[in-house]
Amino acid sequence: MYQKTKFENGLRVVSHDMKERESVALGLWVAAGGRYEVDRIKGAAHFLEHMAFKGSAKYSCDQVKELIEGVGGSVNAFTSEEQTCYYAKFPAQHLKRIFDVLSDIVFLPSINAKDVAKESTVIVEEIKMYKDLPQYYVYELLDELMWPNHPLGKSLAGSAETVSAMSRSDLNGFHKKYYVPGNIVISSAGKVSHQQICELVQKKLRKVPTGLKMNFVEANNTQVKPRAKIYKKETEQMHLALGMLGLENDHDDKYALNLLNIILGGNMSSRLFNEVREKRGLAYSIGSSLKYLKDTGMLMIRAGVDNGKLVNTVDVVMKELSKIRRFGVTDDEFKRAKDFYLGQAFLALEDTMDHMLWIGESTLTRDRIRSIEEIVILVNKVKITDLKRVAQQIFDEKHYNFAVVGPVNDKQEKELGRLLGF
């Protein structure tokens, strides 16, 4: 059972009491990510995530880690396009201590100039590291193609230039603007009651001023022709990513697309895994995934292939997309995809961390949580014909965006252009 409370200052608390567990997972979610940034401070949300762990009004950098890890807990954070989440998992008896630490670093980070200067060099090295890893850098290239000249198309970490120029004042300004109660959700799952969490919030955070809810620049979901970006680099393996415009988070066809993705490349029994890897041995790694955002989305196919097998791999992928568009999926594929999706959902919700992430993100992005029973109903409402209809919408050649990192030669580039139409 999920319980939710909204305090007068706008702060939302959502919880799930899993009495049979011994752990608690706790998350503080902020509706602030890469798409909320202007060019001058690109990377600010990610930078601020780093700075929160440098210490707060009450706790030093060392204390933040030691007070949580010292009782067997783990602590971390992540930044995405639309949110930043600070989270910990720990034995239930240490709830009060760890709530105090997490809430302090989120609401009262120290952000001193010395730490900002030092951490900027660390983040610049992180940016360089990912650029040197083609399996990650290809995703940045794909985002640039998907959403050109838009915050969504720019690196979450920012650039070496924007990060190096970021000041304490910039980060304090970003924190003051976005880290406000009306923009924050606290979620918990495990051996913890809703009343326990609310009492801790009431004691520490109820007097924090509400602040204003901020908007972002809407995505441009129009594309009239395919786009490609080839980054030539001497590597032992080509890394490719093919993206196409997907669906926004609350779209009615979301569950149909989820099933379609599973059949296409979501697991080891998918079409792409069987056709590209098992039958032809063209790639070690091949699969597809989905990204849902408030006003846009993406279906992405990614693969790591032998340098000489790039064109053959893309050819097989394109043929598989065409088959699904023309003929849809089989009854057996459809049934297995439903069973896989629901089975994964049930398994994930057994874990306190996965459950906390589920209810926290749902509340932050949609201000509501679907129960597993509701999800079962919605998935079972999907018809096999829905998948073909959605495939015909999503697998539109005008909407293809292709990125590759590796030693692509002129002949390969020409063949890719022929296959993809760029």
Image (tube, rainbow, N blue to C red):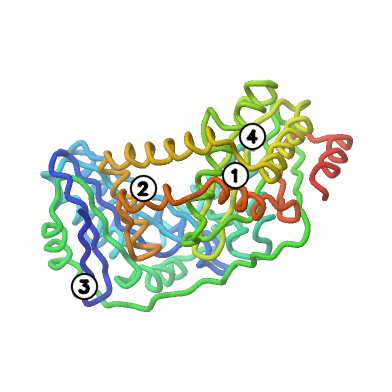
Instruction: Report the disc number at residue 7.
Output: 3
Q: Are marks 2 and 3 in contact (CB under 8 Å)?
A: no
Query: Alpha carbon of mark 2 to alpha carbon of mark 3: how far?
Result: 31 Å
Question: What residue would you read off at disc 4?
Answer: 303
Task: Indicate the position of residue 4 as horizontal and vertical percent values.
Answer: 22, 63
Looking at the rendered image, the disc whose residue lies closer to the viewer, 2 or 1, is 2
Q: What's the residue type where badge 3 is placed? A: Phe
Residue at 42 percent of width and 47 percent of height? 380
Q: What's the residue type where badge 2 is placed? A: Val
**Badge 1 element:** helix
Q: Earlier in the sequence, mark 2 or mark 1?
A: 1
Vertical position of residue 323 compared to residue 390: above or below: above
In this view of the protein, which residue sits in the foreground, 341 or 12? 341
Q: Earlier in the sequence, mark 1 or mark 4?
A: 1
Instruction: Report the disc number at residue 128.
Output: 1
For disc 2, the neighbor class at 10 Å (few under 14, some 14 to 19, many from 20) is some
Query: Alpha carbon of mark 3 to alpha carbon of mark 1: how far?
Result: 42 Å
